[in-house]
Amino acid sequence: MKHPIHRLIRDQDGATALEYGLLATLIAAVIATAVGAIGTSIRDLFNTLSTAMNAATS
């Protein structure tokens, strides 16, 4: 009984795939956060420009 348990503990098949999956998830989360922050900044910039242009043409 001891040998199968030790084999299971030492078995690292699939560890690389799991690590790549975790890395891909982390990268996706960082990209989603960055896109959200950049999108908000761009929206604010366009709103400021729109307000300035409306004030200049009025």
Image (cartoon, rainbow, N blue to C red):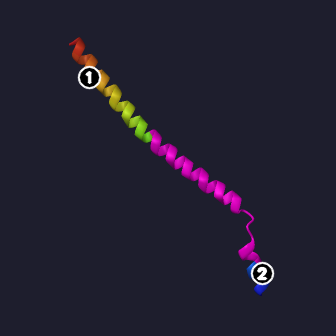
For residue 31: magenta? Answer: yes
Looking at the image, the residue that sits furthest to the front is: 10
Asked where in the image residue 37 lies, by quadrant, the reply is top left
Q: Is residue 29 above or below residue 39?
A: below
Q: What stretch is highlighted in magenta?
A: 7-35
The amino acid sitting under disc 2 is Pro
Which residue is at a point 73% across and 67% down the rendered structure image? 12
Q: Do the residues labelled 1 and 2 touch (CB within 8 Å)?
A: no
Q: Mark 1 points at which residue?
A: 51
Which residue is at a point 37% across and 36% down the rendered structure image? 40
Q: Quadrant of the N terminus?
A: bottom right
Asked where in the image residue 13 lies, by quadrant, the reply is bottom right
Viewer-proximal residue, 14 or 54? 14
Q: Mark 2 points at which residue?
A: 4
User: x and y percent of residue 50 in the render?
Assistant: 30, 22
User: x and y percent of residue 43 in the render?
Assistant: 36, 31
CA neighbours of label 1 inside 10 A, class few (<14), some (14 to 19), many (20+): few
